[in-house]
Image (cartoon, rainbow, N blue to C red):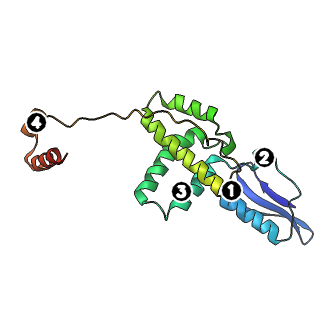
């Protein structure tokens, strides 16, 4: 028979075994799809039903999960935790259910406009860098055929330049600081 993606996101292979219709289930995500296609080929079935390109396109949340799993050995635990937090808390609620091919420059513009109400451009720039990194990685791994955000122009960063305290400000800070912090404040001030 063939490989199918169910409405709930699970991948399965429908086939005939001992004269009866059967289905083998492989879970959700990109790895599950690969296992289903491998199983389909291993039992000698060819895919006679072709899905439309939109049905074949990966969902962004699946790409993020696969990206994080692939980066486990290459990135520090802190970097991965920060990425997971950012994805789960901010990016995936907005883009997670979209097909990767739907994350076009127009959709990213809408994302930027919505985020501009609550955060600085620098934060949005970092978030877009993560989105583009996931899509570029997915293209290299051939999970997607085209990166729809490849030429997207990022918003300019608005990093604030924070000046160190003046000598007078340091004296006033030290005057009100507890004794155990004074050495740390002095070291911080004199080392920049």
Q: Mark 1 and mark 2: span between their CA atoms?
A: 14 Å
Return the mark for residue 142: 1
Indicate which label's residue lies in the foreground, 3 or 1: 1
Q: Mark 2 and mark 3: span between their CA atoms?
A: 25 Å
Indicate which label's residue lies in the foreground, 1 or 2: 1
Q: Which residue is mark 2?
A: 53
Quadrant where the image shows the N terminus: bottom right
Closer to us: 48 or 17: 48
Q: x and y percent of residue 44 in the render?
A: 86, 70
Taking the spot 76% from the left edge, 52% from the top edge, the residue there is 6
Taking the spot 48% from the left edge, 29% from the top edge, the residue there is 116
Secondary structure under tag 4 reads helix
Secondary structure under tag 2 reads helix
Q: Residue 150's quadrant in the figure?
A: top right
- Disc 4 or 1, which lies upstream in sequence? 1
Crowding around mark 2 (Cα neighbors within 10 Å: few <14, some 14 to 19, many 20+) is few
Q: Is residue 133 above or below residue 32?
A: above
- Disc 1 or 2, which lies upstream in sequence? 2
Return the mark for residue 68: 3
Q: x and y percent of residue 154 in the render?
A: 52, 36
Secondary structure under tag 3 reads helix
Is the Cβ of the residue at disc 3 closer than 8 Å to that at disc 4?
no
Q: Mark 2 and mark 4: span between their CA atoms?
A: 64 Å
Q: Mark 3 and mark 1: span between their CA atoms?
A: 16 Å
- Disc 3 or 1, which lies upstream in sequence? 3
Indicate which label's residue lies in the foreground, 3 or 4: 4
- Disc 3 or 4, which lies upstream in sequence? 3
Q: Which residue is mark 4?
A: 167
Q: Mark 4 and mark 1: span between their CA atoms?
A: 57 Å
């Amino acid at each position: 028979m063939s490989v199918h993606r169910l409405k709930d996101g699970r991948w399965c292979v429908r086939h005939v075994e001992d004269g009866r219709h059967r289905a083998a289930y492989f879970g959700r995500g990109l790895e599950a799809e690969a296992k289903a296609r491998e199983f389909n080929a291993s039992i000698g079935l060819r895919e006679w039903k072709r899905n439309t390109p939109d049905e074949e396109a990966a969902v962004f949340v699946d790409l993020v999960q696969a990206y994080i799993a692939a980066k486990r050995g290459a990135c520090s635990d802190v970097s991965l935790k920060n990425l997971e937090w950012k994805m789960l808390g901010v990016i995936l609620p907005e883009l997670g259910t979209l097909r990767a091919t739907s994350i076009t420059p127009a959709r990213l513009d809408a994302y930027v406009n919505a985020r501009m109400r609550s955060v600085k451009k620098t934060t949005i720039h970092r978030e877009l860098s993560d989105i583009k990194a996931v899509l570029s990685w997915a293209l290299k791994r051939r999970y997607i055929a085209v990166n729809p955000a490849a030429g997207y122009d990022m918003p300019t960063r608005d990093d604030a330049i924070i000046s160190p305290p003046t000598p007078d400000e340091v004296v006033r800070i030290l005057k009100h600081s507890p004794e155990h912090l004074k050495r740390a404040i002095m070291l911080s001030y004199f080392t920049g």
